[in-house]
Image (tube, rainbow, N blue to C red):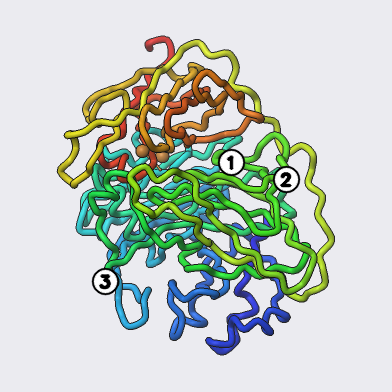
Amino acid sequence: MPRIVHPMAMTRPLPPRRAFLRGIAATFAFVAGCGRQSGGDSQLTTSAATSHALTEGEPLPMLDTLANASSDVSQFTASLVAEREDVAIVPGASTSMLRYNGRSPGPLIELAEGQHVRIELENRLDDSTTIHWHGLPVPSNQDGNPMDPVAAGTTRIYEFDVPRGTAGTYWYHPHPHDATASQVARGLAAPLIVRADDDPLAGIPEVLMFITGLKLDAQSQVAPDTPIDWTVGRQQEMLLVNGRRLPVHAVAPGATQRWRIFNATAASHLRLALEGHTFTLVGTDGGLLGAPVAGLAEFLLAPAQRAELIVRANGAPHGRYRLRALRFETDFLNLGTYQDQDLLTLATTNALPTPPVELPPVLRPIEDLGPPTAQQSVSLDEVADVCTSNGAKRTFLINNRLFDMNRVDLVTEVGRVELWNVVNNTAMAHPFHIHGTQFQLVSRQVGTDVTPSPYLAWLDTVLVPSQQAVTIKARQTLPGKRMFHCHILEHEDNCMMAILDVRPANGA
Ligand code: C2O
Ligand code: CU
Ligand code: CU
């Protein structure tokens, strides 16, 4: 059973403002909680009176876990309510947010491989919504596609099985036609983890870092997207980790931790770097790699991507190290908004140093999907004068076509292994996402220079930088219509999406 560190465990009984004085760090202790059953604790109660989500330097909160209402461990049964609520984010103001079960980010869903899942969504919003289980191979009619809206004031049940071998780091978010960006910006997004019984890293304490963006206007309300946002993706968001601005994550010197980091921002490419430390990559979107990749000075997490990084904290007490998102992209519209940003501070306590934990040299087998028997070609294109009703200055399309939910753009067959060649002809990078499956990056291409992927990994989103191409190997296991799109949410809403029709094998 994996353990999740509760950084707040010792601070809860303290008077509010003392909760994060440096001296108190000495008393921090890590209480092992049981990941799957530990839900329900509210971390924000201690300092609710004086601290807000935007108060910097507060301890990194844990996210609540959605409780399983079923006593049968082979089932996961729960309900989610999506609702507009006024939340005190900024002192003296209330901000209208959209939340799942009164939380933003929403509750962590923890599933086990092989479980049958039944989650009821009650839509108390004023608009249609859906829940999309980003990265999971759920049946297409359970995947929250824009074709299957849940109307305001109604309820629906999502039901699916969690296949063996899918242990990994996922998330869920709305996917309604034309309104994904605004619903996510106002607070609807949450983590989902699938666990395996035989996780080789189960003994390493785990920390979730769910990164979202927040941009408020002068009235402390979530700012609507501007024409610039509609062009290049939402700009100038504050980055929050587990709903907090610049929190502090305190650990014993030398501690080894498994960080699951989620990029749930609309459009921020997070080039992650931790001062004074390197990362060991052990997992990507769809779970563990075959073997750890050690010594990474930085790791690029594109919008919608997730990673599992092993961090071994410096062995000296009272150290402070910023986890940063370094500038990734050139600023092709000269906005001046693409800058280094801080995410949180890793603080070592004065506890006795923890001895290093050895990682297993092998994590789990990842098999190459095998020889492809078909190819798909995708171009990412830039045009003017279409999809401009929201003020977008330029529009980005897939294969030069505007999204149409009644059209099929590409066709495949269940079980067929395909090479997808995705070419970015535009001036900016686009995170390319396919629903319903995890794929493998084969190579990247700049000009005529082809670089094979150095290792096999399961991905559902791959970044395609400007004027570059990627080749991926993909296979769908279930029939039905699947979305594929840019995961810059404004691009997804604004025409840069298409439909893959997965037909039963052998034309049956
Ligand atoms: Cu998170 Cu259609 O995707
Ligand atoms: Cu998705
Ligand atoms: Cu895009």
**Residue at left offset 58%, top offset 13%:** 371
In percent of width and height, residue 506 lies at 42, 10
Label 2 beta carbon less than 8 Å to ligand 1: no
Q: Nearer the viewer, mark 3 or mark 1?
A: 3
Q: CA distance from mark 3 to mark 1?
A: 38 Å
- Disc ID at residue 295: 2
| Residue under the image location 66 percent in, 30 percent down | 455
**Residue 114 pos. (x, y %):** 57, 40
Label 1, secondary structure: give it: strand
Label 3 vs 2, first from the N-terminus? 3
Find the distance from the CA under tag 2 to the CA under tag 1: 16 Å
Q: Circle 1 sits on which residue?
A: 284
| Label 3 neighbour load within 10 Å: few <14, some 14-19, many 20+ | few
- Is residue 135 left or right of 380 when viewed as pictured? right
* Residue found at x 47% / y 48%: 171
Instruction: State the residue lying farthest toward the left.
Output: 389
Q: Could you say where residue 22 lies in the image, as x and y percent from the top left? A: 65, 81
| Image quadrant occupied by the N terminus | bottom right
| Residue marked by disc 3 | 218
Q: In the displayed structure, would residue 369 be above or below residue 438?
A: above
Q: Amino acid at mark 1?
A: Thr
Q: Is mark 3 within 8 Å of ligand 3?
A: no
The answer to whether residue 309 is above or below residue 99 is above
Q: Amino acid at mark 2?
A: Gly
Q: Secondary structure at mark 3?
A: loop
For the point 81% across and 65% down, the residue is 354
Q: Is residue 464 left or right of residue 22?
A: left
Q: Quadrant of the C terminus?
A: top left
Q: Amino acid at mark 3?
A: Ala
Crowding around mark 1 (Cα neighbors within 10 Å: few <14, some 14 to 19, many 20+) is many
